[in-house]
Image (cartoon, rainbow, N blue to C red):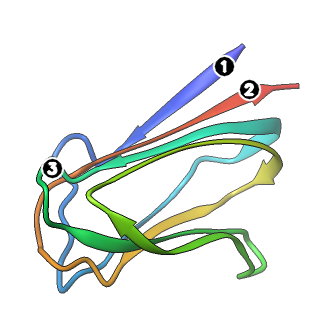
Amino acid sequence: MIKIYELGTTGGTTASGYFAVNTNRINDAILQHVFVDFGDNTTQFEFKLIDNKDRNIIYLNSCDTVLNRSYNLPVRGIYTLAISNATVDTAFKLRFACQDV
């Protein structure tokens, strides 16, 4: 079964170019997909997926407007999804999909 976590779709907004949210605990899953959409044509940003030991599992330092990537990455525990250095403080959509194993 694939679980889709939607974060930031109900008013997620960067403040001073930054936004971060923690996931619920994930038990033995595979990260399948990450989607971030600022809904405009100009916003640039950085994206990080950080584990509970403060390690950058995914670090993308130059994203334009929409991040839409597929992965096949084992995940377990609580993660932080962080958007930083956004060129505009605005609302966005943030989703990631995990498949239970």
CA gap, disc 2 to disc 3? 26 Å
Residue, far top: 1
Image side of residue 51 versus residue 9, left or right? right
N-terminal-most mark, 1 or 2: 1
Query: Where does the image place residue 101, in percent across and percent down from the top left?
Result: 89, 25
Query: Where does the image place residue 66, in percent across and percent down from the top left?
Result: 32, 51
**Mark identifier at residue 11:** 3
Depth order, front residue of 69/97: 69
Residue at the image point whose x is 18% and y is 62% from the top = 13
The residue carrying mark 2 is: 99
Residue 90, by quadrant, is bottom left
> Disc 3 residue type?
Gly
Image side of residue 59 versus residue 16, left or right? right
Query: Where does the image place residue 46, in percent across and percent down from the top left?
Result: 42, 75
Query: Where does the image place residue 47, in percent across and percent down from the top left?
Result: 47, 69
Judged from the image, the secondary structure of the residue bearing numbered disc 3 is loop
N-terminal-most mark, 2 or 3: 3
Residue at the image point whose x is 82% and y is 50% from the top = 76
Image side of residue 58 versus residue 93, left or right? right
Asked if the residue under mark 1 is in contact with the one under mark 3, i.e. CB atoms within 8 Å, the reply is: no
- 64 w.r.t. 73: above or below: below
The residue carrying mark 1 is: 2
CA gap, disc 1 to disc 2? 4 Å
